[in-house]
Amino acid sequence: MIDKMIKHILKQIWVQRITNAWLWMELFLVSIFLWFILDYLYVAVSTYITPTGFDIEHTYRVGLDQMPLESEDYIPADKKKTTIGEDYLTIVNRIRNYPGVEAVSISSYAYPYSGANSFNNYQLDTTQVNLQLRHITSDFFRVFRITTPDGKIEPLVSAFKQKNSVVISKDADQKLMGDGHSALGKTLTQPDVDSISKKVTGICSYIRYSEFAKGYPCAFFGYEESDMAKVNSSDFFFGLDLCIRVSPEVDHNFSSNFRKDMTRQLKVGNFFLLDIKSFADIRDSYFKMTGDFNELKTRLAVVAFLLINIFLGIIGTFWFRTAYRRGEMGLRIALGSTRTSLRGLLIAEGLVLLTIAIIPATVVSFNIGRADLVDVDRMDFTFMRFLIGIVVTYLLMIGMIVLGIWYPARQAMSIQPAEVLHEQ
Amino acid sequence: MYKQYLSQTLHLLKENKLLSIISIVGTALAISMIMVIVIVYEVKTANYEPETHRDRMLTIKWAGIVDKKHPDWNSNSMLSLKVIKECFYPLKSAEAVTGLLPYQQKLANIPGGTTDLKCDVSFTDAAFWKVFEFSFLKGKPFVQEEFKSGIKKTVITESLARHLYGNIDVIGKPIRFSYVDYIISGVVKDVSTLAEAAYAQAWVPYTVIKRPFYEDWSEGLLGAFRCYILARNSSDFDKIRNEVNRNVSALNAGQKNQNLILRGQPDTQFVQMTRKWANEDAKVKETVIKYTIILVILLLVPAINLSGMTLSRMRKRMAEIGVRKAFGANKKELLGQILYENFVLTILGGIVGLFFSYISVFFMKEWLLSTSMDSFLAGSSSLSIGMLFKPSVFLYALLFCLLLNMLSAGIPAWKTSRTNIVNALNDR
């Protein structure tokens, strides 16, 4: 029964081959374009929803600046009793005592969405791995809630406090040791530099740079606040970032309250408070800079464009077709076809045409994927990934075809058989 | 003749409302998306105040250093003042060269005042006012002698003046940027963040700075400066590049351990647009390929769509074509008529499309026009009439309409005009 119907539909399509050729071509090309973009969206969205390894809710970055030499308020070193490091730590402690502040960390090249990074090769036994380096104080784990693979923060903090220690991410551990082994307790060295060797005291979960970035093996190196007191170079402190976590209760208008209360208190030595920004805002700015969301929006716009075109093409073609085949339709109704089955026939015609178009499109698409013309950096091109993309493409196109045939089909169904047969 | 075609076309339009709407919507959609790309491109590359000479300007956004012994050791950032002084200021083939420490975040207030305002201050030289053309509402910029003496004078924007003083009669009045006091010498109209090179909310001579940041590192090659070169004519670009390369080689010859690299800079406005990060080359080829593919999709898909429909429409009118032929219309005339008829549809769609593209650019500028920096800046990415409504935009719109018309009606018109009279009359 069904194969008879399909045969019949194929015959119909063949009869209308000239207009169908245009439609077929459009369906074929759009299937490929659509799959290509949907594949990108699939990779982007699945990357986006994977855990980043940090938590930026209720976190802020406190921006400090230093008085320039040309300022009249600048205090020259010989007029100061404290070191620059001591001034800095005074500020850190004042922030720590501000109501609602839960943790304060000092770091460089470390906070999420920073846009500035540092990388280097490290070695364990004979294996060498390129690691992203983050220099932090132990509170950094508390500020951004970075955890061990089983979800605990405090073991990392205490592991990190040991002398000469390094905490590495799970993927760094795997790369260094292979599956089933752990680098815990072993010594990490920097190739060509004998003086740097650190003991791995903790392993944290995967850490990514941002929601859209793929994971990169990472190592946390320590800053000791007590060591900083001796530092008297202003440049060193330009490179440091102060990040804080506040309790949810105080996190309303926190930035403006903090500025109001602390501007005077944080003017210590030549330091002063420049601004305080929530990480939600920093994240926003970062994504505007990288254009990740904009790229997503652009591609969604092209998807919408393609789908609307399919819709327009289908509605236009089938409008003509039903008008052209009024006689046939009238005859069918006269011979007992119901109006619903007539609509079904038209829709089936559209779907068969789509299927004929999407089969070669699938072959082309698969080869585009195999040729690595898609994003294989963030996700491998697997058969599953391809299948999901092509099935969604197919479903979306089916949706558009059904929508597009609906109106012309209604027109066809309103035919009065007697009228049409009379015309004939 | 064409008048008759026009009234005939309009009549046909009314007769078949649904199909006319489909054709117009299809065209409008394609044209509006294409024109969004064109308008964005124009806003990013065309001349407008204060970047009035983008067509003869060259940019050095980034700089890098490479270790002389280890070519794979590199570090990337911006230019140092030393490099600007040794490689760029002496350029003989250029009309003007400006060095710029772009938009540093500062706290602005009236000395003794209580309110702080975050604002973007650029540190620059006197040539800056020659490379870029600002409209001064009050006062004037600092001149070369003042710049040399390290005078603490500043030019600020209208809105900054209004924020602090409530009006723009502020010439000679004091202003403080992060604990350094300046005297206001000029007030200019606000600058959109889209003018990435010229944008700031206040400009001061960089000679004020006693110790530039970071320049102690990297043998004085890297810093936080950018450089903009104004050529007398865009045909001088190669001459300027050659001179820059000679100067850089001379500089590198005197360096001990590190060489300066510019990765193909100085860039034209378009090339610098495709250069995103400090450690990468400009992605001109990738950008061109990407936009070509997008344009092809945007033109091809609706063209196939419209072709199918035009063919169907022509089939319906076969009898009419047959009669026209029987009465002596030749192929050329028929071809012209069909293309013309279709062009009326395309133009209607094009007008609607262009209208929507302006609306989209205006309401979605955060998405469409975002530059890499503007989310960090305090100013707004405002658009002006002069940036958007350019003759070139309308010309491009017409061009793409014609192209779309040829693509969507070319084959149907060709086929129809060649139909045999007898077949046509028999509606076959």
Image (spheres, coloured by chain):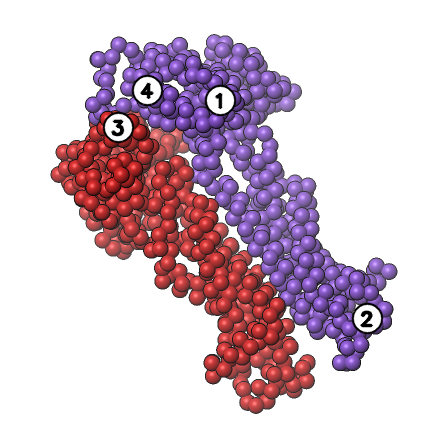
Chain colours: A purple, B red
For the point 46% across and 55% down, the residue is B359
Q: Is residue A238 in view from this perspective?
A: no
Q: Nearer the viewer, residue B146 or B351?
A: B351
What label does residue A250 carry, if any? Answer: 1
Task: Say which of marks 4 and 3 sits in front.
Answer: 3
Task: Say which of marks 4 and 2 sits in front.
Answer: 4
The three-letter amino acid code for the residue at tag 2 is Arg
The three-letter amino acid code for the residue at tag 3 is Gly
Asked if labels 3 and 2 touch by Cβ distance under 8 angstroms, the answer is: no
Q: Please give the residue where the numbered disc 2 appears in the rendered image.
A: A332
4 or 2: tag closer to the N-terminus = 4
What label does residue A264 carry, if any? Answer: 4
Crowding around mark 1 (Cα neighbors within 10 Å: few <14, some 14 to 19, many 20+) is few
Vertically, is B270 above or below B305? above
Cα–Cα span, label 1 and label 4: 20 Å
What label does residue B113 carry, if any? Answer: 3
Q: Secondary structure at mark 1?
A: helix
Q: Secondary structure at mark 2?
A: helix
The three-letter amino acid code for the residue at tag 1 is Val
